[in-house]
Amino acid sequence: MHERIYVCHTFYHVYVACLKEFHILHQFSGAIIGASKAGAGSEMAGRATLVLSKMSNKFGSMVDRARDCGLFEEVIEYDEKVDTFFPELAPLRTNTGSLPKNMINRIKFCKRFAQLQEKYVPVDFTKYKDIYVFCDSDPIGYYLNYKKIRYHALEDGLNCIKYGDQARYDNNGHFKFKAWLASTGLIFIQNGWGRYCIDMEVNDISILDYPCPKYIEVPREPLVQELTQSDKDLMLKLFVENMDELKKQLEEGADKPRVLILSEPLCDLETRERLFKDLVRDYGTVNGKDAIVMIKQHPRDYLDYKTKFPEVILLAGTFPMEMLNFIDGLKFDKLVSVYTVVDSIKFVDEKLFLGDDFMDKYEAPEIHRLNEQIIDD
């Protein structure tokens, strides 16, 4: 039996997997030694497998760096397939107007989708003692449910359920009945509601509007506080492809007011361009003075910022923003985010989280105000 396996869909997921691995290393060895294949010095080093789904994120050269960093036993890419990849599933996703008929179709869908997914699953999950799955709403959740394999779920992003409880929103109306069906394994519901989900790790239970009996609180900040400098250095090497280039960008205008804007895959591309141009215009000053503006691109935001925003400095989308916490001396005056939770960011004086009220100006409120539309039955 292997010890642990993490199924990750984003760079942030890999970041949290690293935090958890460093925590285990600290627990068992007392202090992390520079983890390298040449001699990590700890029996626990490299005991976990990292699975990187290619479904919604381009991990690129990070795959090779993850294989070389010594923190993981094995790094495997997963050609995970969305349901629309299989045309035969489309009729089972059609709303019949009847709850019983919809549930029968859904039972068939969950089983067939998992069967079709099986040929693409790259590992035998029964060989692992502990399975950790980020974003089990993706096909891997259906597969594990179908195979009756128990696993631990983890929140997709920091405190993300507070701003969009996808499990309840996706199953709006008769949720208790659907949750009961999920508890039998007949259908699958993500985020702690599946029969074979052992528990669901969240950063802060107190801020969540709706309970789930399988939520467990595993705060991220204590894991970050445990990191030594060598841990941070290892993660920077893992995530940042060209540190010299990044540091050169970050040194731009260090003696001037500076603003960092976090890009996100919001709305359609045309609207997104207008939205971020408004952000640059409205928040690109500090105390009335023009600031150096940088945009940190989101990994799944494919707007061509380099062409559309020639006046800003564009930071790559190939690393989680938390990596910037590990760069000594980095300082920004202002950080602007629409939905990305910025609680973990340490290098700014002022954090602006704009949220739903801001997005109302760019798209219909019902598109993003998910929790407000949940029917509490």
Image (tube, rainbow, N blue to C red):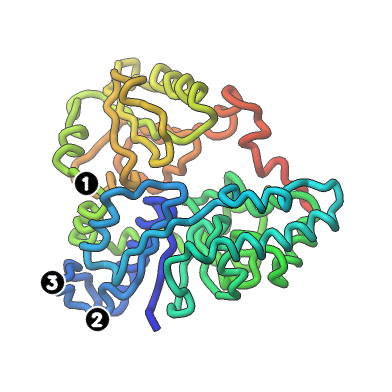
Q: CA distance from mark 2 to mark 3?
A: 13 Å
Q: Callout 2 environment at 10 Å: few (<14), some (14 to 19), or many (20+)? A: few
Question: Is residue 375 found left or right of 236 in the rendered image?
Answer: right
- Element under label 3? loop
Report which quarter residue 64 is drawn in: bottom left
- Label 2 amino acid? Glu
Q: Which residue is mark 3?
A: 38
Q: Where does the image place residue 125, in percent across and percent down from the top left?
A: 47, 74
Image position of 214 with respect to 356: above or below: below
- Element under label 1? loop
Q: CA distance from mark 1 to mark 2?
A: 28 Å
Regarding residue 217, the answer to whether it shows in the image is: no
Of the image marks 1 and 2, the number of the one nearer the N terminus: 2
Taking the spot 58% from the left edge, 33% from the top edge, the residue there is 356
Q: Where does the image place residue 354, in percent across and percent down from the top left?
A: 50, 32
> Where residue 43 is drawn, which disc sits there?
2
Q: CA distance from mark 1 to mark 3?
A: 21 Å
Mark nearer the viewer, 2 or 3: 3
> Where residue 241 is drawn, which disc sits there?
1
Image position of 267 with respect to 89: above or below: above
Q: Where does the image place residue 30, in percent across and percent down from the top left?
A: 25, 76
- Element under label 2? loop
Mark nearer the viewer, 1 or 2: 1
Of the image marks 2 and 3, the number of the one nearer the N terminus: 3
Taking the spot 84% from the left edge, 54% from the top edge, the residue there is 99
Image position of 54 with respect to 119: above or below: above
